[in-house]
Image (spheres, grey):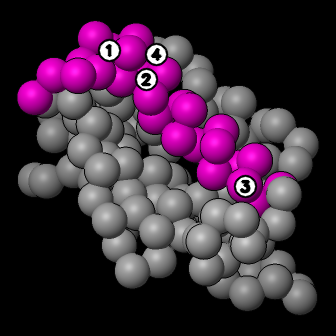
Amino acid sequence: MLPRLKSAARSVITVAVTTGVAVAVAAGTAGSASAAQYVSTPTGGVIWLTHAETVAAARSGLATYISTTPGVAEHVGVYMRPDSRYRQAPHRIPGKPGLFVTVRTQNLVAETAAHPTGRIGILINTRNPNVPVTVAQYWSH
C-alpha cells in the first residue's frame, strides 16, 4: 500500500520508522527480547517503543526533528492520554478536521518517559496520506 501514498506521506513514514529504529539502537534494545514491538493493524501498524526506548527518545531529542522539519511536521498527529498535562486547551482550526493542541512531539515523549510504565507508539496509517503518522502516549497507573 505504500506505493499508493503521496511522496510526502512515504517520507513521513520513513522518518517515523527510522526514528523508531534509531531509538532502539540508541537504547541498546534492538534485537533483544525487550525491543520495540511492531503490531499490525488494519490501516498499517504500530511500533511500540519499550520504556527504555521511550526514555532514550526523550533524551535524544529525535522527536524534535519530527515536529520541526518542514514537509514532515504537518503530516504527523499525536494521541494524548486524557490525563496528559498538554491536553488542557484543545481547539479547532477552521477548515481542518479534528481537535488541535499546541504542543511539540518532544514534550509528549518527555512526559511519557517520566512515567515508570510510559511507552510511545508510532502509528503508521497508510489509509490517511495527510496524516500517515501519529505519535501516541501510553502509561498505566
Q: Magenta span has 24? A: yes
Residue matched to label 3: 10
Observer-side mark, 2 or 3, equals 3
- Compute the Cα span from label 4 to label 3: 26 Å
Label 2: state its secondary structure.
Answer: helix
> Where's residue 11, x and y in %?
75, 47
Q: Are marks 2 and 1 in contact (CB under 8 Å)?
A: yes
Q: Is residue 105 left or right of residue 67?
A: left
Tell me: residue 53, above or below residue 105: above
Is disc 3 surrounded by few (<14), some (14 to 19) or many (20+) residues within 10 Å? some
Observer-side mark, 2 or 4, equals 2
Observer-side mark, 1 or 3, equals 3
For this rendering, which residue is in front, 84 or 125? 125
- The residue range painted magenta reads 8-33
Dominant secondary structure, magenta: helix
Label 4: state its secondary structure.
Answer: helix
Q: Are marks 1 and 3 in contact (CB under 8 Å)?
A: no
Q: Are marks 1 and 4 in contact (CB under 8 Å)?
A: no
Q: Which badge, 4 or 3, is on the more N-terminal residue? A: 3
Q: Which badge, 1 or 4, is on the more N-terminal residue? A: 1
Observer-side mark, 1 or 4, equals 1
- Compute the Cα span from label 1 to label 3: 26 Å
Q: Residue at x 46, y 59 (%)?
A: 123
Q: Is residue 7 left or right of residue 63?
A: right
Q: Which badge, 2 or 3, is on the more N-terminal residue? A: 3
Q: Mark number for residue 23?
A: 2
Residue matched to label 4: 59
- Compute the Cα span from label 2 to label 1: 6 Å
Is disc 2 surrounded by few (<14), some (14 to 19) or many (20+) residues within 10 Å? many
On the question of residue 66 being in view, the answer is yes
